[in-house]
Amino acid sequence: MQNILAIWQREMKSYFVSPIAYVVLTVFLFLSGVFFFSMLTAVVQSTMMQGFGQGAQPVDVPGIVSRSFFGTTSVVLLFMIPMLTMGLFAEEKRRGTIELLRTTPVGNFQAMMGKYLAGVTFLLVMFCASGLTMSALFIYGQPDLKPILGGYLGLFLYGAALLALGLFISTLTENQIVSVVITFGAILILWLIEALAGGAEGVTRDVLSYLSVIGHLDDFIKGVIDTSHVVFYLTFAFVGLFLTYRSLESMRWKS
Amino acid sequence: MIEVENLTKVYNQHRAVDGISFRVEKGEILGFLGPNGAGKTTTMRILTCYMPATEGTARVAGYDVFEESIDVRRRIGYLPESPPLYPEMTVNSYLNFVARIKGVPSARRRSSVDDVMQKCSIGDVGRRIIGKLSKGYKQRVGLAQALLNNPEVLILDEPTIGLDPKQIFEVRSLIKNLAGEHTVVLSTHILPEVSMTCSRVVIIDRGKVVAQDTPQGLTNQMKGAERIALQIDGPREAVLEKLRSIDGVLSVQAGDGQGPAADYTVECRLESDLRSALAQAVVSQGWGLLELRGISLSLEDVFINLVTRE
């Protein structure tokens, strides 16, 4: 536990002394802010138009805005998460500090968990920052709390799953660029798989759409927490961590 | 303290380490000598549990490096070939981190970090970023890291590389002071380093142990013959003849000295000190004896003899 904490702390510090943390946070906040703003103006405008027409119906502005906000945030995260994981093991290998970790009493599991939790913590920092944008909805309206909490929970599980995948890919190379590109490609495939599912039929279609990382988010954003989706993301993260662990063990034999 | 038996490491059919065996007793400093690519680093990496051996066993402080890896890692300090540093950290926070993962309890962490910083004379750069330090400082931060938690066994891969002569001297005396309490294995290809610091030498070449002894023992073993250098002022041919006639002289070679004085190298049987006999012979002929000294074989010659390939 002591070791996990030490690795976690070192990793957090190294995020914030390198430009990566600031670049990722800035770009993430900027993009989600822009989307939030454009979504809000679009919804408000269409509501006003409707208002002038006949039989105006009440429109849930905060609901629509928060739903589309989570949708776009999930896409932005797709680009950001590979940046968070790219260096976790690749940099240790390139600098030779992996030799330090593997000749001191730090187990592979501890090293992996320390790094993984650092990624997860950074994700939470990003969410807290984007919460500032969301708070506008609470100041100027009365949004339904459930879909917002559900959305954040879903995004958190989704992010945690992708972090595990990125962590695994980071153990495979000592080049950060290779790591980031492969991670991004892998995530993109898991995202686009939904489009492929559209063309398929029967069981193939079901399997493909089940594998889509983004499809499982929909229910969360609607405020429905379905355990099958929670299980999907947790299994995904577990498999990623398992592969990472195996890869670390095998590194011993390959080096 | 360290027992290595029949250790072999094969990389894609290349035998980097080929059945080496040696022992290191507690408190000894063992020098690991060999040309580049001889298998020094590989052996050290196996001893530090970084990679497993293909065959053979190694025990450090009584624990098997493969079966009881964590127990071994608790008891060693390791300085790899390139010091394992995080360039974005300050020296203080780096050493603190290493102390933590080595299991130094938090109450003693501060003092043990200060202690190794003082030993490696890096106290003045504690707040500096490692990436901005010079090579010599980086190397010493790496050494400080290895000394943390006062390990029983220290494994140092070329500890003096990149240091200036004064720092080399300091590091060598630091290592010498560590002996007794700690067991040290250091690799190097700087020969004087071995004769200055080590109590025993293992010379390896192409993955095999070619010799192991004390530095003194190795030189004696390799000598075969004593050599004496002379500078004599006298007629060349007559001098050669006279020197050759002395009992115990195996051969005489004349150097190309100019003027009246010339250099001669006399090779004579081992353990026959011919210096006074030679002096007498020269003086009795009325020639001028300008210089006379015994040539001792250096460890360098031994090393070259052992590892020179046909």
Image (spheres, coloured by chain):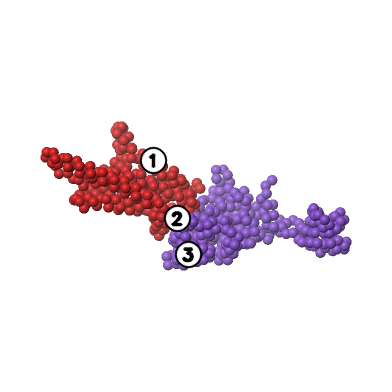
The reply to whether label 3 and label 2 mark residues of one chain is: yes
Q: Residue A191 appears in which quarter of the rendering?
A: top left
Q: Which residue is mark 2?
A: B88
User: Quick check: can you spot residue A11?
Assistant: no
Protein chain holding label 1 = A
| x, y percent for residue A59 | 17, 44
Of residues B237 and B43, the one nearer the viewer is: B237
Chain A visual colour:
red
Protein chain holding label 2 = B
Give the crowd class for mark 3: few <14, some 14-19, many >=20 residues within 10 Å: many
Q: Which residue is mark 3?
A: B113
3D distance between C-alphas at marks 2 and 1: 29 Å
User: Quick check: can you spot residue A25?
Assistant: yes
Q: Which disc number belongs to residue A185?
A: 1
| Residue type marked 1 | Gly
Q: What residue is at 14 percent from the left and 40 percent from the top?
A: A52
Asked if the residue under mark 1 is in contact with the one under mark 2, i.e. CB atoms within 8 Å, the reply is: no
Chain B visual colour:
purple
Q: Which disc number belongs to residue B60?
A: none
Asked if the residue under mark 2 is in contact with the one under mark 3, i.e. CB atoms within 8 Å, the reply is: no
User: In the rendered view, would you say B190 is above or below B309?
Assistant: below
Marked residue nearer the N-terminal end (3 or 2): 2
Q: Secondary structure at mark 3?
A: helix
| Residue type marked 3 | Val
The C terminus of chain B - image quarter: top right
